[in-house]
Image (tube, helix red, strand yellow):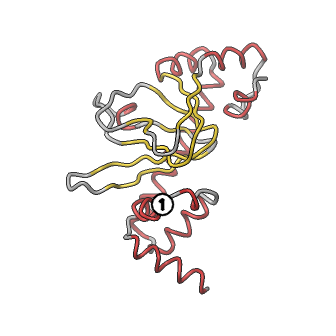
């Protein structure tokens, strides 16, 4: 089996033929640090699997303030889900920026949808991934409503154990909904035990 297909679809038993067919649908993309995969206002028709690196999805509000929605690391999928799956057809509402050099594999959503029809195992696999992503986003909303900033930071460290050194403080603070000063204070509290 193709190593990339094994990595992406590791939960699905696939023949070599099916593996080769799936790989033929993917396009490899490399991004340098600070490069944009997507900017708000652009057309989006693709989904991306992250083979390595780290990306950040963020939204800029009417006052110009950035709100980090997601960090995505190896093994995660990324896109502008509002534009791609939303009821109203819209252009991208968010930016996706590379914050650590990354290798991704792109597939147009329309082709992925066709694969899901042709290969029900792929469909089940993707539904499982979307359900997990939906639950994760819902958990994050609840955490933002009910947990202290310190508890949210600890959850961040548990969710993204290997990226803190690659992410700027203001990105983490934006993700947590706090100021960089609050983040520094929380880190100091934790280090002093």
Give the residue at the far bottom of this rendering: 192
* Relative image position of residue 174 (x, y in whole percent): 39, 61
**Nearer the observer, 191 or 19:** 191
Q: Is residue 15 left or right of residue 52?
A: right
Give the residue drawn at x 43%, y 59%: 171
Q: Quadrant of residue 63?
A: bottom left
Give the residue drawn at x 57%, y 61%: 164
* Relative image position of residue 9 (x, y in whole percent): 68, 31
Vertical relation: 125 (above or below) 155: above
**Nearer the observer, 140 or 121:** 140
Q: Is residue 58 left or right of residue 164?
A: left
Vertical relation: 22 (above or below) 75: above
**Nearer the observer, 110 or 164:** 164
Give the residue drawn at x 53%, y 41%: 131
Vertical relation: 17 (above or below) 127: above
**Nearer the observer, 105 or 98:** 98
Q: Dividing the image into 4 quarters, which one contains the N terminus?
A: top right
Counting every numbered tag in the picture gives 1
Q: Is residue 12 left or right of residue 54?
A: right
Callout 1 environment at 10 Å: few (<14), some (14 to 19), or many (20+)?
few
* Relative image position of residue 76 (x, y in whole percent): 58, 42
Q: Dividing the image into 4 quarters, which one contains the C terminus?
A: bottom right
Instruction: Say what secondary structure mark 1 lies in.
Output: loop
Q: Which residue is mark 1?
A: 168
* Relative image position of residue 142 (x, y in whole percent): 43, 61
């Amino acid at each position: 089996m193709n190593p990339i297909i094994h990595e992406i679809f590791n939960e699905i038993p696939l023949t070599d033929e099916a593996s080769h067919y799936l790989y033929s649908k993917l396009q490899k993309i490399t991004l340098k640090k600070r490069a944009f995969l997507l900017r708000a206002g652009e057309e989006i028709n693709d989904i991306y699997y992250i083979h390595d690196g780290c990306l950040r999805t963020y939204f800029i509000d009417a006052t110009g303030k950035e709100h980090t929605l997601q960090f995505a690391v190896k093994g995660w999928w990324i896109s502008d889900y509002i534009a791609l799956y939303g009821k109203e057809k819209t252009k991208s509402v968010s930016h996706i920026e590379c914050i650590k050099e990354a290798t991704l594999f792109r597939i147009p959503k329309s082709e992925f949808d066709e694969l899901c029809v042709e290969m029900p195992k792929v469909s089940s696999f993707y539904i499982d991934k979307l359900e997990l992503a939906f639950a994760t986003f819902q958990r994050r909303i609840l955490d933002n409503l009910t947990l202290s900033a310190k508890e949210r930071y600890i959850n961040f460290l548990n969710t993204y154990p290997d990226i803190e050194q690659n992410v700027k403080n203001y990105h983490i603070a934006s993700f947590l909904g706090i100021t960089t000063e609050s983040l520094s204070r929380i880190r100091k509290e934790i280090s002093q035990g």
